[in-house]
């Protein structure tokens, strides 16, 4: 049996054979290229979707193979989606969309899904700011004491917010990624969770880049 992330990608490519590319461009915000492909910017990179696959292809020696295949799979799912609405700008954590399957909280109460990002940030809000700015997030507001909200257009019809909570003597720092309530109209929960993982991975990479630069 092959690797799950590759099998998922191959399945998505198979479905793209019958995808309505005109409808995807019109309803979900893709660009069209001269040869009829779909094009989209995602996490700081330009991707091209055809009926034969998603370019650029994953390098054979990729050090982040799972991430690279997941990125292409979620973009394929976005093209295949039947979603056709504008965001409502009403945001919820990922577990809200799981219909009670996942609580979203780890043993210490922090968001388990953002653990890789918290490890890369190390509880340093300035490092989080640098990583967020590097990826293109925009600071929105401070809510209460020690809670900072950043916004980002993850996909043309899918805005997200990143909420950073400063820690104290009792609770560690935490980061939550919030999705517009229309997200399930574009993604079923499993690909939405994969999308969330891709976003967190990219933010963590941005944080590590700044750490290495220091």
Image (cartoon, rainbow, N blue to C red):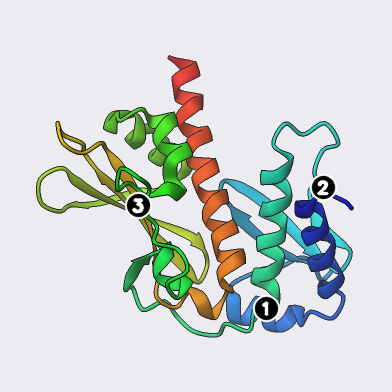
Q: Is residue 131 above or below residue 34?
A: above
N-term mark: 2 or 1 = 1
Question: Which residue appears farthest toward the left when viewing the image?
Answer: 145
The extreme top residue here reads 214
Q: Earlier in the sequence, mark 2 or mark 3?
A: 2
Say which residue label 2 marks: 57
Residue 6 sits above or below residue 14 on the image? above
| Residue 163 vertical placement versus 52 (above, below) | above
- Count numbered badges in the picture: 3
In-image side of 48 versus 13 (left or right): left
In front: 145, or 2? 2
Residue at 81% from the left image edge and 73% from the top image edge: 16
* Element carrying mark 3: strand
Residue 24 is tagged as 1
Foreground: disc 2 or disc 3: 3
- The residue at which mark 3 appears reads as 176
Residue 211 location, x and y as percent? 44, 20
* Badge 2 density bin: few <14, some 14–19, many ≥20, Cα 10 Å: few
**Around disc 3, counting alpha carbons within 10 Å, would you say few (fewer than 14), some (14 to 19), or many (20 or more)?**
many
Residue at the image point whose x is 39% and y is 36% from the top: 118
Label 1 vs 3, first from the N-terminus: 1
Q: Secondary structure at mark 1?
A: helix
Specify whether 188 is left or right of 145: right
Q: Residue 103 falls in which quadrant of the image?
A: bottom left
Left or right: 196 as drawn, with respect to 190: left
Q: CA gap, disc 2 to disc 1?
A: 21 Å
The kind of secondary structure element at disc 2 is: loop
Residue at screen point 55% across, 65% down: 192
**Residue 146 shows in the view:** yes
Q: Residues within 10 Å of mark 1 (few under 14, many from 20)?
A: many
């Amino acid at each position: 049996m092959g690797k799950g992330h590759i099998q998922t990608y191959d399945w998505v490519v198979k479905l793209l054979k019958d995808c309505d590319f005109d409808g995807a461009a019109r309803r979900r915000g893709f660009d069209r290229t001269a040869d009829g492909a779909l094009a989209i910017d995602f996490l700081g990179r330009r991707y091209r979707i055809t009926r034969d696959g998603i370019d650029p292809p994953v390098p054979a020696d990729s050090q982040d193979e799972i991430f690279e295949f997941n990125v292409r799979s979620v973009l394929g799912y976005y093209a295949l989606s039947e979603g056709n609405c504008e965001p409502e700008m009403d945001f919820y954590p990922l577990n809200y969309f799981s219909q009670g399957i996942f609580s979203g909280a780890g043993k210490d109460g922090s968001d388990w899904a953002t653990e890789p990002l918290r490890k890369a940030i190390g509880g340093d809000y300035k490092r989080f700011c640098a990583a967020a700015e590097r990826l293109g997030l925009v600071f929105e507001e401070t809510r209460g004491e020690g809670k900072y909200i950043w916004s980002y257009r993850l996909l043309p019809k899918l805005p997200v917010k990143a909420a950073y909570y400063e820690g104290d003597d009792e609770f560690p720092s935490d980061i939550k990624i919030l999705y517009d309530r229309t997200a399930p109209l574009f993604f079923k929960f499993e690909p939405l969770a994969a999308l969330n993982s891709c976003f967190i991975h990219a933010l963590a990479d941005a944080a590590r880049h700044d750490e290495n630069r220091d």
